[in-house]
Amino acid sequence: MPRSIFTIGALPGVSIEGAYIHPENIEKVKKLIEAMPEIETRAYQKACTNFGKMLARYVRRCIMFNTPPEGVSWPPHSPDYLKKYNVQGFWYLSGQMLRSIRLRQYQGSYYVGPNPGEKAADPVNIYGRSRTSKLTLVQLARILEGGTEGHSNSKFHNDIPPRPLFRPSFKAVGGTERLKKYLIANLRREVKKYL
């Protein structure tokens, strides 16, 4: 898989603490212990799915309205860009990035971003037919996220200033702490089914 822009990984320090077990509940506890790996997996999947969908909505909203995530500012577009594309934001340019952003899963990891293999459409359709660029949407997202300023081997004749979107969005929707709360709440729900 191509490197993702941002991966929602495992959370360190999340554990279930032991407690006193009444003799009448021994069978329930044995079933709970046997089912614990499945419970943890389901809780992780539900927490990442809920958090990831919320993050994807936030990122799409930022793209749609051309507003940076909280705590970040984007530099203004050059007059040449505005004249050429007549569109308000790099991230929205053809609308393809907006439509492609969603929660995705790959080998047990969850991430929010564009489709890894999809080629970016050429926003300027001067020939009256659809054209695609050589860049994939993931590559384009990395360029927009980090910019090309100061890269001597840049393929671009103009420097593109960074317009961070994914990492600041993760922080804006609550970050690791909120994901941890989702995980703990889902673990509690799953454990209650066995008790």
Image (spheres, rainbow, N blue to C red):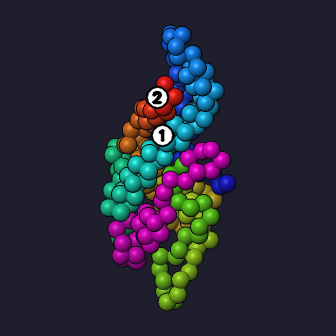
Magenta span includes 103: yes
* On screen, residue 20 above or below 51: above
Instruction: Please tell me which residue is depicted at 34% across the width and 68% down the height of the picture.
Output: 88
| Residue in the picture at 64% in, 27% down | 34
Disc 2 packing (10 Å; few <14; some 14–19; many ≥20): few
Task: State the residue in front, 144 or 3.
Answer: 3
User: At which x and y percent is residue 139?
Assistant: 58, 60
- Locate residue 100, reporting x and y percent: 49, 63
61 vs 44, nearest the viewer: 44
Mark 2 lies on a secondary structure that is helix
Q: Is residue 159 visible?
A: no
| Residue 107 located within the stretch drawn in magenta | yes
Q: Quadrant of the N terminus?
A: bottom right
Vertically, is 35 above or below 52? above
The three-letter code of the residue at mark 2 reads Lys
Per the image, the residue denoted by label 1 is 47
Span colored in magenta: 81-110
Q: Residue at x 52, y 36 (%)?
A: 43
> CB under 8 Å between callouts 2 and 1?
no
Can residue 142 be seen from the camera position used here? yes
Amino acid marked by disc 1: Ala
Q: Earlier in the sequence, mark 2 or mark 1?
A: 1
Q: Quadrant of residue 178?
A: top left
Q: For the residue carrying disc 1, how many other residues have a C-alpha within 10 Å: few (<14), some (14-19), or many (20+)?
A: many
Disc number at residue 192?
2
Where 100 falls versus 42 (above or below)?
A: below
